[in-house]
Image (cartoon, helix red, strand yellow):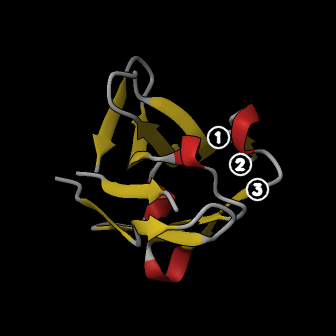
Amino acid sequence: QVQLVESGGGLVQPGGSLRLSCAASRSIKDFTTMGWYRQAPGNQRDLVAAFTSRGTTTYADSVKGRFTISKDNAKNTVYLQMNSLKPQDTAVYYCNAQIWSTDSAEPFWGKGTQVTVSS
């Protein structure tokens, strides 16, 4: 069983920064993909940033240039540095990891951490 535990959310003013962390219960090298999604009230859960199966990074257009995803293999942790935050970044942020096999993709989710951007 895989556990993903997010931390680092909170209340921040527009223009501020936060760093989210996602600690995994096993080596993150085991995962095919790993990244962050977010869900605002009434909206679907959308991809924010992720490490792809090719080892590259991908970002939602709305966060490009402001957010950076990184990882520390030794700590089994993935981070999301969020700068120049905007009120529209307010959402619950979820860590996601997937293990792909020949005929399936097994997803794992954290419980989420709330990010609120407001003055």
Residue at image position (33%, 31%) is 41
Query: In the image shown, does 79 or 106 lie closer to the viewer?
Result: 79
Point out the residue furthest to the bottom here: 74
Residue 5 image offset from top left, x and y in percent: 28, 64
Q: Which residue is mark 3?
A: 66
- Whether tag 1 and tag 2 are in contact, CB under 8 A, the answer is yes
Residue 70 percent coordinates (x, y): 65, 66
Q: Which is more N-terminal, label 3 or label 1?
A: 1
The earlier-in-sequence mark between 3 and 2 is: 2
Name the residue: 47% across, 40% down.
37
Per the image, the residue denoted by label 1 is 52
Q: Position of residue 65 (x, y in %)?
A: 83, 52
Q: Give me the C-alpha separation between circle 3 and circle 2.
A: 20 Å
Q: Secondary structure at mark 3?
A: loop
Query: How much space separates mark 1 and mark 3, taking CA atoms?
Result: 19 Å
Q: Residues within 10 Å of mark 2 (few under 14, many from 20)?
A: few
Foreground: 81 or 88?
Answer: 88
Residue 111 is left or right of residue 105, and the answer is left
Residue type of the residue flagged with mark 3: Arg
